[in-house]
């Protein structure tokens, strides 16, 4: 029996489903390009409702892809959401896996 | 950041920081301050423009911080841009401040020299000052990629020319250009807040 030929499509089996979910992908791509942001900023940038965003953030936090940090500015608390190194690596890996797949859908000519 | 789509997302985040209209309003304060200084003949360390620049330099950042935290951040949220972007902004800021300080020094030196050419320059001092401030404003437009700031620089210079040509009181062109830029800044701010605000209901706050 011959071994299956590796293909970009086969790589889909190993895709990180935490990252792959559209809303979480949206959150991670927004966090990837900045250092940190608060909840309102992410809500505004992604268009997600507060409840939806909160639920996805919990999943990302549980996966270790995002950390929640608290800081004080002018004696007022500010909650910041930041992508971890692990989160960045997972996101880059996901993008790397998806790119060849996207190449399949383009006209080779 | 090689991916063009990620670069677009980063650009959007950047625009929420610099393209909200607050910087336009602050710039209008500089023009208005210079106009008031000219009209009332304030003369704090050497010339009126320097008085306005010193005031602007001291007040601009604290004012911007207060306006960001009171007006923008509760509605649009807070973002800390990437270290690379922040380093670029810092470098651009230094360039513009250096230009402003450099031109202010030139103005002081020119105002101290008693010669025929400085006397003729003094007769067109409103235009000279407008060009001296207009250049850093246009440079800021180029560095920060806020194209309407070229317009702000042009408004200042044109208003100074009109003031000179019409024989209006010294400084009135600056006041007019300051008022125009202020109104434009308010319009940009309003449009920005309408485009980006998260409603209180969505935000989970009391409505």
Image: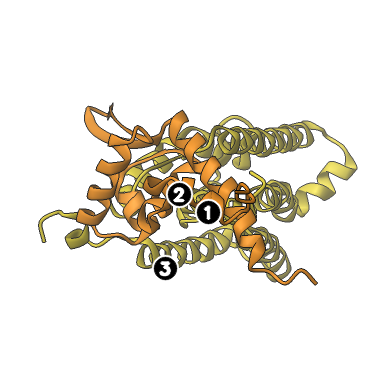
- Asked whether A97 or A55 is in front, the reply is A97
Residue A83 lies in what quarter of the image? top left
Please tell me which residue is depicted at 57% across the width and 48% down the height of the picture: A97
Chain of the residue where label 1 is placed in the rendered structure: B
- Residue A31 is situated, as x and y percent measured from the top left of the image, at 44, 43
Chain of the residue where label 2 is placed in the rendered structure: A
**Residue labelled with disc 1:** B9
- Residue B94 is situated, as x and y percent measured from the top left of the image, at 65, 32
* Disc nearest the viewer among 3 and 2: 2
Do tags 3 and 2 sit on the same chain?
A: no
Question: Is residue A41 rendered to the left or right of residue B101?
Answer: left
Task: Work out which quarter of the rendered image holds the C terminus of chain B and state it.
Answer: bottom left
**Residue labelled with disc 2:** A30
- At label 2, counting other C-alpha atoms closer than 10 Å, the crowd grade (few under 14, some 14-19, many 20 or more) is many
- Asked whether A106 or B3 is in front, the reply is A106
Tell me: residue B102, above or below residue A27.
above
Chain of the residue where label 3 is placed in the rendered structure: B
Chain in yellow (letter): B
Which label sits on residue B191?
3
């Amino acid at each position: 029996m011959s071994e299956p030929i590796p293909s970009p499509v086969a790589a889909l089996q190993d895709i990180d489903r935490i990252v792959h979910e559209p809303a979480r992908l949206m959150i991670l791509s927004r966090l990837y390009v900045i250092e940190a942001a608060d909840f309102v900023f992410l809500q505004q940038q992604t268009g997600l409702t507060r409840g939806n965003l909160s639920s996805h953030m919990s999943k990302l936090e549980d996966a270790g892809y995002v950390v929640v940090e608290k800081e004080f500015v002018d004696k007022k608390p500010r909650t910041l959401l930041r992508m971890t190194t692990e989160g960045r690596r997972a996101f880059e890996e996901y993008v790397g896996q998806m790119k060849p797949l996207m190449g399949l859908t383009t006209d080779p000519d | 950041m090689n991916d063009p789509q990620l670069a677009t997302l980063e650009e959007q985040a950047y625009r929420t920081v610099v393209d909200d209209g607050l910087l336009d309003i602050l710039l209008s304060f500089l023009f208005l301050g210079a106009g008031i200084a000219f009209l009332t003949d304030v003369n704090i360390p050497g010339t009126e423009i320097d008085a306005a620049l010193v005031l602007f330099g001291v007040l601009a950042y604290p004012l911007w911080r207060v306006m960001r935290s009171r007006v923008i951040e509760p509605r649009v949220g807070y973002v800390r841009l990437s270290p690379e972007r922040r380093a670029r902004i810092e470098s651009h800021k230094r360039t513009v401040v250096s230009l402003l300080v450099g031109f202010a020094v030139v103005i002081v030196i020119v105002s101290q020299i008693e010669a025929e050419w400085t006397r003729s320059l003094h007769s067109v001092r409103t235009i000279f000052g407008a060009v001296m401030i207009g250049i850093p404003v246009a440079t800021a437009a180029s560095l920060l990629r806020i194209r309407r700031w070229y317009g702000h620089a042009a408004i200042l210079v044109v208003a100074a020319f009109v003031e000179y040509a019409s024989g209006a009181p010294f400084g009135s062109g600056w006041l007019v250009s300051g008022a125009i830029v202020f109104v434009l800044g308010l319009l940009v701010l309003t449009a920005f807040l309408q485009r980006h605000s998260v409603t209180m209901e969505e935000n989970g706050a009391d409505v």
